[in-house]
Image (spheres, rainbow, N blue to C red):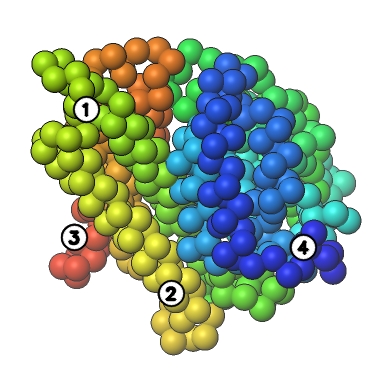
Amino acid sequence: MIAAPEPGLTERELIDRAVALRPALLERQPETERLTRYPKDTHDDFLQAGFYRILQPRRYGGYEFGLPTFYRVVTEIARGCPSTGWALSLTAAHVLQVAAQFEERAQDEIFGDDGEFRAASTVMPVGVARPDGDGHVVLDGTWPYASGSPYSTHYVGQTLRAPEKPGDPPGPLVLFVAPRSVWTLLDDWHGVLGLRGSGSNSIRMEQARIPEYFTREASLLDLPVEGGTPGSKLHGNALYAGRAPSFFHGELAAIMVGTAYAAADEYARIVAERPLILEPDRTRAELHDYQRHLGEALGAIHTAEAALQRNAEDYMETCRRNVSGEAPFTIADDNRLALVFLTAGRMAWDVTQSILFRTAGSRHARDGERMQRYFRDASTYWTHIGPSMAEPLARRVGCDRLGLPSHDIPLIP
C-alpha cells in the first residue's frame, strides 16, 4: 500500500487548484507551443497539485476520485491552455485501463514503490508481440501521436500477437504496458496546425522486452468488463469496471469544453477593450450583437459542460450496476455514452469556430493571438480519430434503438 502524497485532499480542493493555475497557464501558452510540450514548471505544478493521481487507485498512492472530478480538472486546465489540457488528459487518464485490466502482480510492478505513473497511449496497433521463451515478449515498432509522452513514465499501446509460424497471419490484438526504460521518444511533433504544445510525439521500441504479464489479449475498443474486472475486484471500486471508448470520448470532450471556455474568456476581453470605429469612446461590449454572440456561445458551452458532467455520472452508475450484477455494461451502453460525450465536444467546437472566432475580428486571426490559437487547437481536435467516429457512433446508437445489430459497424475505418 502506497500512501497518497496528501491523503486528506478533497475533490473540491483539487478543482480549485486547477482553477488557480489558469493565469500561469495562459502566460505559458507561447512557450508551450515553442517547446511542443508544456514546460517543466507546469509538470512540477501538476505533480504538486496531484493531477496525475486523480484516477489512480488508493492502493498505489492515488486519490481514486471519480470521472466528474477528473473531467472538471481537465476542463479547467484546458481553459488555461488547450495543449496542456490535452497532454494532461491523455497521460493521467490511462491509469484507468491499467488498474482495471491487469493482474495484481503486474500492477505491483507497474506502480512500483512510489506510485509514479503517467502513460501516453494510442489505439492503433503496431507490429507484433513475439514471445522470447523466457516469460517476456519482444516489441518493435514506432507508435505515433503518443500525446503527453515527454512526461510519461509508461506507454499503454496495442500490437498483434506474433503468428504461430512463418507465413501465418498475426494473431489477435494485444494490449501492453511498456515502462519508459524500453522506449525512445522521437522529436517529431512539429509542423502541425494546432495542439502544438501537446507533446504528441512518436515513441519507438527496438527489441524492447517486457514481462508477458504486462500484456493482455484484448482490444482497447472492446475490453472485457462484464460482471467486473481484475481491477474492480482488487481495488473494490466499480470505477475500474467500465468500457474504454466512451471514457476516451469524455477525455476529449472535457478538453474541448475547456477550449471553448477559453475562447469565450478571450472574446469577452476583446469586445470589452476594442473601441467602436465611429464612436471610439464606446466599446463593442456595448453593442447588442456582441452581447448576443457571447451569450449564445456561453449558453452552448454551459450545456456541453452539463452534458459532460451528467454523462460522467451515468458512466459511473453503469459501472456500479455492472459490478453489482444489476445490469452488464454493454456495448450499447458504451455507444450511447460515447455519443453524448462526442456531441458535447462537437457543441464546443461549433460555437468556437462559428461564433467566437468568426466574430472576434480578423486581427485576432494573426499569429500570436490567443483566439487564433484556440481556433487552431479546436480544429485539430476535430481531425482526431475520436471525433471521426461521430457518424458510425450515430449509426450504432440508431441501430441499438431500432433493435438492429450494430456491433459490425466499424468505429475506425
Residue type indicated by callout 3:
Gly
Q: Is residue 398 left or right of residue 388?
A: left
Residue type indicated by callout 1:
Thr
For the point 57% across and 16% down, the residue is: 34
Q: Earlier in the sequence, mark 3 or mark 4?
A: 4
Residue type indicated by callout 2:
Thr
For label 1, the SS is loop
State the mark number for residue 318.
Answer: 2
**Residue that numbered label 3 is attached to:** 398
The foreground one among 384 and 309 is 309
The foreground one among 16 and 283 is 283
Q: Of tags 2 and 1, which is closer to the observer?
A: 1
Q: Earlier in the sequence, mark 4 or mark 1?
A: 4
**Residue that numbered label 4 is attached to:** 6
In 3D space, how far apart are the residues under numbered discs 2 and 1 (Cα atoms)? 49 Å
Tell me if residue 117 comes above or below residue 242 in the rendering. Answer: above
Q: Are marks 1 and 3 in contact (CB under 8 Å)?
A: no
Tell me if residue 108 comes above or below residue 85 in the rendering. Answer: below
For label 3, the SS is helix
Q: Are marks 4 and 1 in contact (CB under 8 Å)?
A: no
> Can the viewer see residue 88?
yes
Location of the N terminus by quadrant is bottom right
Residue 39 horizontal/vertical position (percent):
66, 28
The foreground one among 48 and 166 is 48
Residue type indicated by callout 4:
Glu
